[in-house]
Image (cartoon, helix red, strand yellow):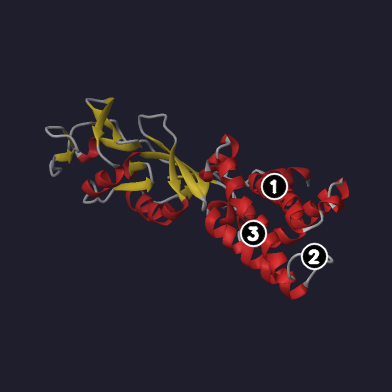
Amino acid sequence: MAIQISKWLNNTYPQNYIVKKPYIGSLIIFAFSFLFLTIYKPLQTHESQFFSYQFTMAIYCCAMSVPVIVIIKLLKCIRYFSNREEWTFLKEIISIVLILLGTGIAIYFTGFLVEAPSQRWNMATFFDSCRYALLIGIYPFAFFTVINYRYLFVTDIEQNFKPEALSSSPAQKEELLRIGSQLKKEELSFYPRQFIYAESEGNYVVFYLNVDNKIKKQIIRNSINNIAQQLSAIPFIMRTHRAFIVNIKKVCSQKGNTLGYHLKLTGTDADIPVSRQNTRDFNLLLKQYRGAITFDSGNRILQ
């Protein structure tokens, strides 16, 4: 049981929508909290001595929703939470707890503006503020987390393919590709079968090519979007991620699940991601250019 729980906690998981879109998420939290508090009046909530009940709740809801943006931005500056592609169920839980703790602190100090300060400067009131933030704020977070529950039970697959021979000689019908640059008089030429993958690095795109049976690295000044357009006529070359373009014929292994894959390519040690929104198109191209898939005795998928 403990092993299964550990597996779930460390399983790849879609990032909570509120965490992924903090500005929209902040509005969602405000709208939900305000409607919930004004309709049901839970947890013995009451108006302050200065404002009406609705206006008091609006102030507290602002104090609860606005810090969400700040806290999420700070979390994304921490390396552990920075990569959305490597999000796990454990990171989901920790981030939500930290966000709700931060909103509880914000609610506590907001109370000094709408309540009598002499009645609030104590630990009991502080813990009550954190408890209210948790009990009310957990609902919108939980909604977006629970709708992705099925990903807890998704198992990773591993596919291995026979490596393509490292031959740089072009096929008879292949035409030389000429890749344009944002710089004048800069151009990169190669045959489609020489292309392994390309990676975006700021204002440049790095090409990895097989030239004379050696991996050659070429850098050109351009955007990955423009390069993808220039390569769009080649059916077996695909943009798998916002920063990567891959030759499907060079894929020698694939690991992952419906949340995304990680690829190994012939002749390189690079770990190439396939984002979740691209997995369907990738699977179709992979089946077309890498052939049928069968299982071995170890239940591992092989070509």
In this rendered view, identify the residue nearer to me: 276 or 235.
276
In this rendered view, identify the residue nearer to me: 79 or 106.
106
CA–CA distance in space, label 3 to label 1: 13 Å
Note whether residue 12 is visible: no
Q: Position of residue 141 (x, y in %)?
A: 65, 58
Quadrant (top left/top right/bottom left/bottom right) for the C terminus: top left
Relative to 137, is 155 on the left or the right? left
Amino acid type at circle 3 is Cys
Residue visible at 77% across and 73% down? 40
Q: Residues within 10 Å of mark 3 (few under 14, many from 20)?
A: many
Q: Earlier in the sequence, mark 3 or mark 1?
A: 3
Residue 187, picture quadrant: top left
Height in image: 204 above or below 33?
above
Q: Secondary structure at mark 3?
A: helix
Relative to 231, is 184 on the left or the right? left
Of badges 3 and 2, the one in the foreground is 2
Q: How many numbered circles does the render carry?
A: 3
Relative to 287, is 82 on the left or the right? right
Q: Position of residue 12 (x, y in %)?
A: 59, 47
Residue visible at 61% across and 59% down? 148
Q: Position of residue 38 (x, y in %)?
A: 72, 72
Q: Residues within 10 Å of mark 2 (few under 14, many from 20)?
A: few
- List the residue tagged with mark 2: 49
Q: Secondary structure at mark 1?
A: helix
Amino acid type at circle 2 is Gln
Residue visible at 63% across and 63% down? 30
Amino acid type at circle 1 is Gly
Q: Earlier in the sequence, mark 1 or mark 2?
A: 2
- List the residue tagged with mark 1: 102
- List the residue tagged with mark 3: 62
Q: Which mark is residue 236?
A: none
Relative to 120, is 3 on the left or the right? left
